[in-house]
Amino acid sequence: MRRVCGAALASVAACWPALAFATTQCPPEYGEKSAAFWALGWTVLGAFALAGLALPALAVRRTLGRGGLARAAWIFAAVLAMFACWIAGLFIFGAYFVMVC
């Protein structure tokens, strides 16, 4: 256990300059982002959230006449796709709207 803790501490110490660089601010010439830019970003995030919510609802409606196991499999796959859609939306929002100078 001690070796693992020592190795983890050594790797964090080796990465310390990169961690410090990640917290630096954007240069002042980039300025503030406009309201239209933020509106577009929140719209993209909302669209992914709504699309994710629609997937399980559509799966429930489409599988009404199927057997129990097939229906459960489709709904489970739709829930996984919903989470994937939400994660993709958060990634796009974070990468292209929040973490941009």
Image (spheres, rainbow, N blue to C red):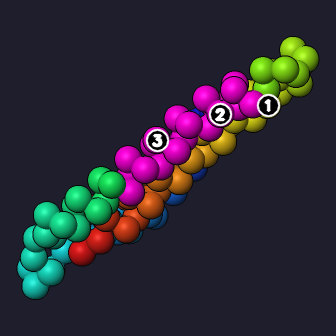
**Gap between marks 3 and 1 measured at Cα:** 19 Å
Q: Nearer the viewer, mark 2 or mark 3?
A: 2
Q: Badge 3, how many Cα within 10 Å: few under 14, some, many 20+?
A: some
Percent position of residue 99, x then y: 31, 65
Q: Which residue is mark 2?
A: 58
Q: How many marks?
A: 3
x 46%, y 41%: residue? 50
Q: Earlier in the sequence, mark 2 or mark 1?
A: 2
Percent position of residue 100, x then y: 29, 71
Q: Earlier in the sequence, mark 3 or mark 1?
A: 3
Question: Residue farthest to the bottom?
Answer: 29
> In the rendered view, does 45 fall on the left or right side of 68?
left
Q: Which residue is mark 1?
A: 74
x 52%, y 35%: residue? 53
Span highlighted in magenta in the image: 44-62
Q: Which residue is mark 3?
A: 50
x 90%, y 17%: residue? 67
Residue 61 belongs to magenta span: yes
User: Considering depth in this image, is 45 or 50 the residue closer to the camera?
Assistant: 50
**Gap between marks 2 and 3 measured at Cα:** 12 Å
Q: Earlier in the sequence, mark 2 or mark 3?
A: 3
Q: Nearer the viewer, mark 2 or mark 1?
A: 2
Q: Is residue 33 above or below residue 41?
A: below
x 78%, y 20%: residue? 64
**Gap between marks 2 and 1 measured at Cα:** 10 Å
User: Considering depth in this image, is 98 or 82 the residue closer to the camera?
Assistant: 82
Give the residue type that dot 1 points to.
Trp
Percent position of residue 10, x then y: 50, 55
Percent position of residue 80, x then y: 67, 36
Tell me the quarter of the picture where residue 72 sits. Answer: top right
Tell me the quarter of the picture where residue 52 sits. Answer: top right
